[in-house]
Amino acid sequence: MNSIDTGSNAWILISAALVLLMTPGLALFYGGLTRATSVVNMMMKCLAAMGIVTVAWTLVGSSMSAGEGGSLFGSLTSDFGLRTVMGLGADEAGVSDGAMTSFSMMFAIITVALIAGAVADRMKFGAWILFTAVWSVLVYFPVAYWVWGGGFLHQWGVLDFAGGAAVHVNAGAAALALALVVGRRIGWREKDSDFAPHNLPMVMLGTGLLWFGWFGFNAGSAFASDAIAGLAMTTTQVATAGAVLAWLAVDRLRGVKPSIIGGCSGVIAGLVAITPAAGFVSPLGALAIGAVAGAVCPLAVGLKERFGYDDSLDVVGLHMVAGLWGSIAVGLFAVESTAAGENGLFYGGGWGLLGVQTGGTLAVAAYSFIVAALIGLALKYTVGIRVGADEEKAGIDSAEHGETSYVLPVGAPEPELSLADGQKPGEAAEREPAKV
Protein backbone atom coordinates (compact mmCIF):
# COMPACT_ATOMS: atom_id res chain seq x y z
CA MET A 1 0.00 0.00 0.00
CA ASN A 2 1.35 3.44 -0.96
CA SER A 3 1.87 5.88 1.89
CA ILE A 4 -0.07 9.14 1.87
CA ASP A 5 1.76 12.31 0.86
CA THR A 6 0.11 14.73 3.26
CA GLY A 7 0.91 17.79 1.13
CA SER A 8 -0.58 16.41 -2.08
CA ASN A 9 -3.48 14.83 -0.23
CA ALA A 10 -4.31 18.13 1.45
CA TRP A 11 -4.18 19.97 -1.90
CA ILE A 12 -6.63 17.56 -3.55
CA LEU A 13 -8.99 17.77 -0.56
CA ILE A 14 -8.90 21.57 -0.77
CA SER A 15 -9.36 21.42 -4.54
CA ALA A 16 -12.42 19.20 -4.13
CA ALA A 17 -13.94 21.80 -1.81
CA LEU A 18 -13.10 24.58 -4.28
CA VAL A 19 -14.79 22.71 -7.12
CA LEU A 20 -17.90 22.14 -5.00
CA LEU A 21 -18.00 25.88 -4.26
CA MET A 22 -18.23 26.48 -8.01
CA THR A 23 -21.79 25.13 -8.12
CA PRO A 24 -23.21 27.69 -5.63
CA GLY A 25 -21.12 30.24 -7.53
CA LEU A 26 -22.79 29.10 -10.73
CA ALA A 27 -26.19 29.43 -9.04
CA LEU A 28 -25.43 33.07 -8.27
CA PHE A 29 -24.02 33.70 -11.75
CA TYR A 30 -27.01 32.12 -13.49
CA GLY A 31 -29.45 33.61 -10.98
CA GLY A 32 -28.24 37.13 -11.64
CA LEU A 33 -28.51 36.61 -15.39
CA THR A 34 -32.16 35.56 -15.27
CA ARG A 35 -35.28 37.62 -14.68
CA ALA A 36 -36.24 38.26 -11.06
CA THR A 37 -39.07 35.72 -11.39
CA SER A 38 -36.70 32.85 -12.26
CA VAL A 39 -33.93 33.11 -9.68
CA VAL A 40 -35.28 30.54 -7.22
CA ASN A 41 -35.82 27.99 -9.97
CA MET A 42 -32.31 28.43 -11.30
CA MET A 43 -30.73 28.09 -7.89
CA MET A 44 -32.86 25.05 -7.10
CA LYS A 45 -31.71 23.36 -10.31
CA CYS A 46 -28.10 23.81 -9.21
CA LEU A 47 -28.90 22.62 -5.68
CA ALA A 48 -30.73 19.58 -7.03
CA ALA A 49 -27.70 18.67 -9.15
CA MET A 50 -25.55 18.69 -6.03
CA GLY A 51 -27.82 16.16 -4.34
CA ILE A 52 -28.75 13.90 -7.25
CA VAL A 53 -25.30 13.58 -8.79
CA THR A 54 -23.69 12.87 -5.42
CA VAL A 55 -26.05 9.94 -4.84
CA ALA A 56 -25.63 8.68 -8.41
CA TRP A 57 -21.85 8.90 -8.08
CA THR A 58 -21.96 6.95 -4.82
CA LEU A 59 -24.03 4.16 -6.35
CA VAL A 60 -22.67 3.76 -9.88
CA GLY A 61 -20.74 6.84 -11.00
CA SER A 62 -17.40 6.06 -9.44
CA SER A 63 -17.52 2.52 -10.82
CA MET A 64 -18.54 3.57 -14.35
CA SER A 65 -16.01 6.41 -14.52
CA ALA A 66 -12.91 4.69 -13.23
CA GLY A 67 -13.60 1.01 -12.60
CA GLU A 68 -12.03 -1.70 -14.71
CA GLY A 69 -14.01 -2.24 -17.90
CA GLY A 70 -13.91 -2.15 -21.65
CA SER A 71 -13.67 0.78 -24.05
CA LEU A 72 -17.05 2.37 -23.23
CA PHE A 73 -17.50 2.30 -19.45
CA GLY A 74 -16.09 0.79 -16.33
CA SER A 75 -17.63 -1.79 -14.07
CA LEU A 76 -21.09 -1.03 -12.73
CA THR A 77 -20.33 -2.40 -9.27
CA SER A 78 -16.57 -2.24 -8.63
CA ASP A 79 -16.90 0.79 -6.36
CA PHE A 80 -20.53 0.50 -5.30
CA GLY A 81 -21.10 2.66 -2.24
CA LEU A 82 -17.57 4.12 -2.66
CA ARG A 83 -16.21 1.15 -0.77
CA THR A 84 -12.66 1.78 -2.02
CA VAL A 85 -12.55 4.77 0.29
CA MET A 86 -12.75 2.42 3.25
CA GLY A 87 -9.49 0.74 2.23
CA LEU A 88 -7.60 3.89 3.23
CA GLY A 89 -5.25 3.42 0.29
CA ALA A 90 -3.39 5.96 -1.82
CA ASP A 91 -2.25 6.25 -5.42
CA GLU A 92 1.35 6.54 -6.61
CA ALA A 93 1.36 10.28 -5.90
CA GLY A 94 0.31 9.65 -2.32
CA VAL A 95 -3.25 10.96 -2.71
CA SER A 96 -5.88 8.99 -0.79
CA ASP A 97 -8.74 7.22 -2.53
CA GLY A 98 -11.17 9.37 -0.55
CA ALA A 99 -9.64 12.61 -1.81
CA MET A 100 -9.56 11.38 -5.40
CA THR A 101 -13.15 10.17 -5.51
CA SER A 102 -14.45 13.32 -3.80
CA PHE A 103 -12.59 15.51 -6.29
CA SER A 104 -13.98 13.56 -9.24
CA MET A 105 -17.49 13.67 -7.79
CA MET A 106 -17.45 17.47 -7.72
CA PHE A 107 -16.64 17.52 -11.44
CA ALA A 108 -19.74 15.47 -12.16
CA ILE A 109 -21.89 17.88 -10.15
CA ILE A 110 -20.78 21.08 -11.87
CA THR A 111 -21.03 19.50 -15.33
CA VAL A 112 -24.72 18.74 -14.90
CA ALA A 113 -25.46 22.11 -13.28
CA LEU A 114 -24.00 23.95 -16.28
CA ILE A 115 -26.76 22.62 -18.53
CA ALA A 116 -29.48 24.34 -16.52
CA GLY A 117 -28.64 27.76 -17.91
CA ALA A 118 -29.86 26.85 -21.39
CA VAL A 119 -33.44 26.22 -20.24
CA ALA A 120 -33.94 29.05 -17.76
CA ASP A 121 -37.48 30.41 -17.27
CA ARG A 122 -39.39 27.43 -18.68
CA MET A 123 -38.31 23.87 -17.80
CA LYS A 124 -40.25 22.00 -15.12
CA PHE A 125 -38.28 21.32 -11.98
CA GLY A 126 -39.49 17.72 -11.84
CA ALA A 127 -38.36 17.14 -15.42
CA TRP A 128 -34.98 18.65 -14.54
CA ILE A 129 -34.56 16.18 -11.68
CA LEU A 130 -35.22 13.24 -13.99
CA PHE A 131 -32.95 14.64 -16.69
CA THR A 132 -30.14 15.16 -14.18
CA ALA A 133 -30.28 11.57 -12.96
CA VAL A 134 -30.53 9.94 -16.38
CA TRP A 135 -28.01 12.15 -18.20
CA SER A 136 -25.45 11.66 -15.45
CA VAL A 137 -25.60 7.89 -15.79
CA LEU A 138 -25.93 7.64 -19.56
CA VAL A 139 -23.60 10.46 -20.59
CA TYR A 140 -21.32 12.00 -17.99
CA PHE A 141 -20.09 8.84 -16.30
CA PRO A 142 -19.29 7.02 -19.58
CA VAL A 143 -17.63 10.11 -21.12
CA ALA A 144 -15.48 10.60 -18.02
CA TYR A 145 -14.36 6.99 -18.46
CA TRP A 146 -13.65 7.51 -22.17
CA VAL A 147 -11.39 10.47 -21.44
CA TRP A 148 -9.78 9.70 -18.08
CA GLY A 149 -10.64 6.17 -17.02
CA GLY A 150 -9.01 4.13 -19.78
CA GLY A 151 -11.79 4.27 -22.38
CA PHE A 152 -11.40 4.56 -26.11
CA LEU A 153 -10.59 8.29 -26.19
CA HIS A 154 -7.86 7.73 -23.65
CA GLN A 155 -6.57 4.91 -25.81
CA TRP A 156 -6.59 7.20 -28.86
CA GLY A 157 -4.33 9.59 -26.98
CA VAL A 158 -6.82 12.42 -26.38
CA LEU A 159 -5.45 14.89 -23.84
CA ASP A 160 -7.93 16.63 -21.53
CA PHE A 161 -6.21 18.05 -18.48
CA ALA A 162 -9.26 19.15 -16.49
CA GLY A 163 -12.39 18.69 -18.58
CA GLY A 164 -12.61 20.63 -21.82
CA ALA A 165 -14.27 17.73 -23.60
CA ALA A 166 -15.54 15.73 -20.63
CA VAL A 167 -17.08 18.74 -18.85
CA HIS A 168 -17.63 21.80 -21.03
CA VAL A 169 -18.18 20.39 -24.51
CA ASN A 170 -20.21 17.61 -22.93
CA ALA A 171 -22.45 20.04 -21.03
CA GLY A 172 -22.66 22.52 -23.91
CA ALA A 173 -23.80 19.93 -26.43
CA ALA A 174 -26.42 18.63 -24.00
CA ALA A 175 -27.57 22.20 -23.34
CA LEU A 176 -28.09 22.81 -27.05
CA ALA A 177 -30.12 19.62 -27.43
CA LEU A 178 -32.26 20.35 -24.37
CA ALA A 179 -32.90 23.95 -25.43
CA LEU A 180 -34.13 22.73 -28.82
CA VAL A 181 -36.44 20.15 -27.23
CA VAL A 182 -37.88 22.54 -24.64
CA GLY A 183 -38.33 25.32 -27.19
CA ARG A 184 -38.07 29.09 -27.03
CA ARG A 185 -39.27 31.22 -24.16
CA ILE A 186 -42.57 32.99 -24.71
CA GLY A 187 -41.84 36.42 -26.10
CA TRP A 188 -38.19 35.75 -26.87
CA ARG A 189 -36.98 37.95 -29.75
CA GLU A 190 -40.07 40.16 -29.49
CA LYS A 191 -39.37 43.87 -29.18
CA ASP A 192 -41.53 44.47 -26.12
CA SER A 193 -40.13 41.52 -24.12
CA ASP A 194 -37.50 42.03 -21.45
CA PHE A 195 -35.16 39.16 -20.67
CA ALA A 196 -32.34 41.37 -19.40
CA PRO A 197 -30.29 40.15 -16.40
CA HIS A 198 -31.92 41.43 -13.25
CA ASN A 199 -28.95 41.61 -10.84
CA LEU A 200 -25.46 42.49 -12.08
CA PRO A 201 -23.80 42.45 -8.62
CA MET A 202 -25.01 38.87 -8.25
CA VAL A 203 -23.46 38.03 -11.63
CA MET A 204 -20.15 39.54 -10.53
CA LEU A 205 -20.20 37.68 -7.21
CA GLY A 206 -20.92 34.39 -8.97
CA THR A 207 -18.13 35.05 -11.44
CA GLY A 208 -15.68 35.69 -8.62
CA LEU A 209 -16.61 32.42 -6.90
CA LEU A 210 -16.28 30.53 -10.16
CA TRP A 211 -12.87 32.04 -10.89
CA PHE A 212 -11.70 31.23 -7.35
CA GLY A 213 -13.01 27.68 -7.50
CA TRP A 214 -11.52 27.14 -10.95
CA PHE A 215 -8.01 27.12 -9.48
CA GLY A 216 -9.00 23.94 -7.68
CA PHE A 217 -10.69 22.68 -10.84
CA ASN A 218 -7.57 23.10 -13.00
CA ALA A 219 -4.60 23.03 -10.66
CA GLY A 220 -6.17 20.21 -8.65
CA SER A 221 -6.23 18.12 -11.82
CA ALA A 222 -2.47 17.67 -11.48
CA PHE A 223 -3.49 15.21 -8.72
CA ALA A 224 -0.46 16.27 -6.69
CA SER A 225 0.99 19.37 -5.09
CA ASP A 226 3.77 19.66 -7.64
CA ALA A 227 5.18 21.74 -10.49
CA ILE A 228 2.35 20.81 -12.87
CA ALA A 229 -0.19 22.15 -10.37
CA GLY A 230 1.73 25.42 -10.26
CA LEU A 231 1.83 25.57 -14.05
CA ALA A 232 -1.91 24.89 -14.28
CA MET A 233 -2.72 27.63 -11.79
CA THR A 234 -0.56 30.12 -13.67
CA THR A 235 -1.95 29.30 -17.11
CA THR A 236 -5.49 29.51 -15.74
CA GLN A 237 -4.95 33.07 -14.56
CA VAL A 238 -3.11 34.18 -17.70
CA ALA A 239 -5.64 32.73 -20.14
CA THR A 240 -8.57 34.25 -18.26
CA ALA A 241 -7.00 37.69 -18.24
CA GLY A 242 -6.38 37.45 -21.98
CA ALA A 243 -9.97 36.42 -22.61
CA VAL A 244 -11.45 39.32 -20.62
CA LEU A 245 -9.40 41.88 -22.52
CA ALA A 246 -10.14 40.28 -25.88
CA TRP A 247 -13.90 40.17 -25.18
CA LEU A 248 -13.97 43.83 -24.22
CA ALA A 249 -11.90 44.71 -27.29
CA VAL A 250 -14.32 42.87 -29.58
CA ASP A 251 -17.25 44.64 -27.93
CA ARG A 252 -15.51 47.96 -28.48
CA LEU A 253 -14.96 47.20 -32.16
CA ARG A 254 -18.65 46.32 -32.48
CA GLY A 255 -19.70 49.57 -30.84
CA VAL A 256 -20.79 47.88 -27.61
CA LYS A 257 -20.00 49.68 -24.36
CA PRO A 258 -17.80 47.86 -21.80
CA SER A 259 -20.12 46.03 -19.43
CA ILE A 260 -20.20 43.71 -16.45
CA ILE A 261 -21.95 41.10 -18.58
CA GLY A 262 -19.23 41.29 -21.24
CA GLY A 263 -16.40 41.22 -18.73
CA CYS A 264 -17.83 38.31 -16.75
CA SER A 265 -18.58 36.40 -19.94
CA GLY A 266 -14.96 36.91 -20.95
CA VAL A 267 -13.87 35.43 -17.64
CA ILE A 268 -15.95 32.30 -18.22
CA ALA A 269 -14.74 31.96 -21.82
CA GLY A 270 -11.11 32.10 -20.73
CA LEU A 271 -11.57 29.69 -17.84
CA VAL A 272 -13.35 27.18 -20.04
CA ALA A 273 -10.84 27.41 -22.89
CA ILE A 274 -7.78 26.82 -20.72
CA THR A 275 -9.35 23.95 -18.79
CA PRO A 276 -8.31 21.14 -21.19
CA ALA A 277 -4.87 22.68 -21.71
CA ALA A 278 -3.91 24.05 -18.30
CA GLY A 279 -1.12 21.56 -17.54
CA PHE A 280 -0.05 21.07 -21.15
CA VAL A 281 0.89 24.57 -22.40
CA SER A 282 3.19 27.46 -21.57
CA PRO A 283 1.90 30.76 -20.17
CA LEU A 284 2.31 32.33 -23.61
CA GLY A 285 0.29 29.51 -25.14
CA ALA A 286 -2.33 30.05 -22.46
CA LEU A 287 -2.49 33.74 -23.29
CA ALA A 288 -3.13 32.91 -26.94
CA ILE A 289 -5.79 30.35 -26.06
CA GLY A 290 -7.58 32.79 -23.78
CA ALA A 291 -7.38 35.68 -26.24
CA VAL A 292 -8.88 33.62 -29.06
CA ALA A 293 -11.68 32.42 -26.78
CA GLY A 294 -12.42 35.99 -25.73
CA ALA A 295 -12.59 37.08 -29.36
CA VAL A 296 -14.59 34.16 -30.73
CA CYS A 297 -17.14 33.53 -27.97
CA PRO A 298 -18.96 36.91 -28.20
CA LEU A 299 -19.50 36.16 -31.87
CA ALA A 300 -20.63 32.61 -31.06
CA VAL A 301 -23.14 33.90 -28.52
CA GLY A 302 -24.78 35.91 -31.28
CA LEU A 303 -25.42 32.77 -33.34
CA LYS A 304 -28.53 31.96 -31.32
CA GLU A 305 -30.18 35.07 -32.72
CA ARG A 306 -29.23 34.08 -36.23
CA PHE A 307 -30.27 30.42 -35.99
CA GLY A 308 -33.20 30.90 -33.62
CA TYR A 309 -32.37 28.52 -30.77
CA ASP A 310 -33.07 29.92 -27.31
CA ASP A 311 -30.03 29.15 -25.18
CA SER A 312 -31.13 31.40 -22.33
CA LEU A 313 -27.80 32.00 -20.58
CA ASP A 314 -25.37 31.21 -23.43
CA VAL A 315 -24.17 27.80 -22.30
CA VAL A 316 -23.52 26.86 -25.93
CA GLY A 317 -21.76 30.06 -26.91
CA LEU A 318 -19.49 29.96 -23.86
CA HIS A 319 -18.98 26.40 -22.67
CA MET A 320 -19.32 24.37 -25.85
CA VAL A 321 -17.50 26.80 -28.14
CA ALA A 322 -14.70 27.69 -25.70
CA GLY A 323 -14.41 24.03 -24.69
CA LEU A 324 -14.09 22.97 -28.33
CA TRP A 325 -11.46 25.61 -28.99
CA GLY A 326 -9.46 24.80 -25.86
CA SER A 327 -9.49 21.07 -26.55
CA ILE A 328 -8.39 21.53 -30.15
CA ALA A 329 -5.80 24.11 -29.07
CA VAL A 330 -3.98 21.42 -27.09
CA GLY A 331 -3.00 19.99 -30.47
CA LEU A 332 -1.51 23.37 -31.38
CA PHE A 333 0.15 24.61 -28.19
CA ALA A 334 1.11 21.48 -26.21
CA VAL A 335 4.71 21.47 -24.93
CA GLU A 336 6.60 18.22 -24.47
CA SER A 337 8.22 19.29 -21.18
CA THR A 338 4.79 19.63 -19.51
CA ALA A 339 2.30 16.93 -18.52
CA ALA A 340 1.44 16.55 -22.22
CA GLY A 341 4.66 14.67 -22.93
CA GLU A 342 4.54 15.68 -26.59
CA ASN A 343 4.60 18.81 -28.70
CA GLY A 344 1.68 20.36 -30.52
CA LEU A 345 1.73 21.55 -34.11
CA PHE A 346 3.17 25.00 -33.30
CA TYR A 347 6.08 23.38 -31.47
CA GLY A 348 7.06 20.96 -34.20
CA GLY A 349 4.85 18.07 -33.16
CA GLY A 350 3.07 17.52 -36.45
CA TRP A 351 -0.61 17.06 -37.18
CA GLY A 352 -1.25 13.86 -35.23
CA LEU A 353 -2.21 15.30 -31.85
CA LEU A 354 -4.32 18.01 -33.48
CA GLY A 355 -6.30 15.37 -35.36
CA VAL A 356 -6.79 13.25 -32.25
CA GLN A 357 -7.96 16.25 -30.20
CA THR A 358 -10.40 17.36 -32.86
CA GLY A 359 -11.87 13.91 -33.48
CA GLY A 360 -12.17 13.01 -29.81
CA THR A 361 -13.83 16.28 -28.85
CA LEU A 362 -16.36 16.08 -31.69
CA ALA A 363 -17.17 12.49 -30.67
CA VAL A 364 -18.06 13.68 -27.17
CA ALA A 365 -20.20 16.53 -28.56
CA ALA A 366 -22.12 14.24 -30.90
CA TYR A 367 -22.80 11.58 -28.25
CA SER A 368 -23.90 14.09 -25.61
CA PHE A 369 -26.17 15.96 -28.04
CA ILE A 370 -27.91 12.81 -29.29
CA VAL A 371 -28.49 11.23 -25.89
CA ALA A 372 -29.60 14.50 -24.28
CA ALA A 373 -32.09 15.04 -27.10
CA LEU A 374 -33.49 11.54 -26.65
CA ILE A 375 -33.83 12.01 -22.89
CA GLY A 376 -35.51 15.38 -23.43
CA LEU A 377 -37.96 13.96 -25.96
CA ALA A 378 -38.80 11.05 -23.64
CA LEU A 379 -39.58 13.52 -20.84
CA LYS A 380 -41.56 15.78 -23.17
CA TYR A 381 -43.92 13.02 -24.24
CA THR A 382 -44.30 11.38 -20.83
CA VAL A 383 -44.18 13.62 -17.74
CA GLY A 384 -43.91 16.88 -19.70
CA ILE A 385 -40.83 19.05 -19.83
CA ARG A 386 -42.17 22.62 -19.84
CA VAL A 387 -44.35 24.65 -17.51
CA GLY A 388 -47.66 26.00 -18.83
CA ALA A 389 -47.83 29.28 -20.72
CA ASP A 390 -49.61 31.11 -17.89
CA GLU A 391 -47.09 29.86 -15.34
CA GLU A 392 -44.18 30.90 -17.56
CA LYS A 393 -45.59 34.39 -18.04
CA ALA A 394 -46.34 34.81 -14.34
CA GLY A 395 -42.91 33.55 -13.32
CA ILE A 396 -41.59 30.04 -12.87
CA ASP A 397 -40.50 30.63 -9.26
CA SER A 398 -43.95 30.97 -7.77
CA ALA A 399 -45.44 28.28 -10.03
CA GLU A 400 -42.78 25.63 -9.36
CA HIS A 401 -41.55 26.49 -5.87
CA GLY A 402 -44.08 28.75 -4.19
CA GLU A 403 -41.35 31.27 -3.46
CA THR A 404 -40.10 34.57 -4.79
CA SER A 405 -36.57 35.91 -4.71
CA TYR A 406 -37.37 39.33 -3.28
CA VAL A 407 -39.92 40.50 -0.75
CA LEU A 408 -40.01 44.07 -2.05
CA PRO A 409 -41.08 44.64 -5.65
CA VAL A 410 -38.09 44.86 -7.97
CA GLY A 411 -37.73 48.39 -9.32
CA ALA A 412 -40.11 49.95 -6.78
CA PRO A 413 -39.49 53.72 -6.40
CA GLU A 414 -37.82 54.98 -3.28
CA PRO A 415 -40.36 56.45 -0.79
CA GLU A 416 -40.47 60.24 -0.66
CA LEU A 417 -39.06 61.71 2.51
CA SER A 418 -40.50 64.78 4.17
CA LEU A 419 -38.22 67.26 5.90
CA ALA A 420 -38.26 67.23 9.67
CA ASP A 421 -38.85 70.44 11.60
CA GLY A 422 -35.83 72.66 11.17
CA GLN A 423 -34.13 70.33 8.68
CA LYS A 424 -32.60 71.88 5.57
CA PRO A 425 -32.69 70.22 2.15
CA GLY A 426 -29.71 67.92 1.63
CA GLU A 427 -29.24 67.20 5.33
CA ALA A 428 -29.27 63.54 6.39
CA ALA A 429 -32.32 62.33 8.22
CA GLU A 430 -33.20 59.07 9.88
CA ARG A 431 -35.51 56.98 7.78
CA GLU A 432 -38.05 54.58 9.19
CA PRO A 433 -37.73 50.96 8.04
CA ALA A 434 -39.71 50.15 4.93
CA LYS A 435 -43.05 48.51 5.61
CA VAL A 436 -43.09 45.08 3.98
Image (tube, helix red, strand yellow):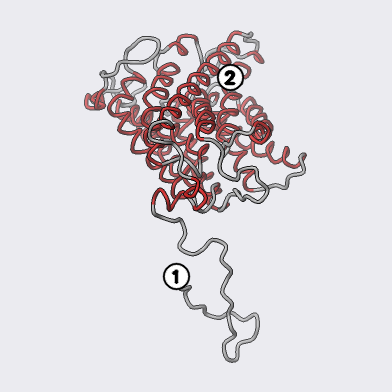
Task: Residue 54: give x, y in percent of width and height.
Answer: 33, 34
- Location of mark 2 (residue): 330
- Mark 2 closeness class: few <14, some 14–19, many ≥20 residues within 10 Å: many
Dot 1: element: loop
Q: Quadrant of the N terminus?
A: top left
Task: Residue 391: give x, y in percent of width and height.
Answer: 47, 49
Residue for point 35% across, 27% down: 100
Residue for point 45% across, 9% down: 155
- Alpha-carbon distance for marks 2 and 1? 55 Å
Viewer-side residue, 197 vs 100: 197
Answer with the quarter of the image where residue 84 lies.
Answer: top left
Three-letter amino acid code at disc 2? Val
Mark sitting on residue 346:
none
- Is 21 located above or below residue 295 in the figure? below
426 left or right, relative to 1? right
Answer with the quarter of the image where residue 249 lies.
Answer: top right
Three-letter amino acid code at disc 1? Val
Dot 2: element: helix
Q: In which quarter of the image is the C terminus?
A: bottom left
Residue for point 61% across, 27% down: 286
Task: Residue 346: give x, y in percent of width and height.
Answer: 66, 15
Specify which label sits upstream in the sequence, 2 or 1: 2
Q: Is residue 231 visible?
A: no
Q: Is residue 322 visible?
A: yes
- Mark 1 closeness class: few <14, some 14–19, many ≥20 residues within 10 Å: few
Viewer-side residue, 333 vs 309: 309
- Is 160 located above or below residue 414 in the figure? above
- Location of mark 1 (residue): 436
Residue for point 54% across, 31% down: 180
Viewer-side residue, 408 vs 82: 408
Viewer-side residue, 186 vs 337: 186
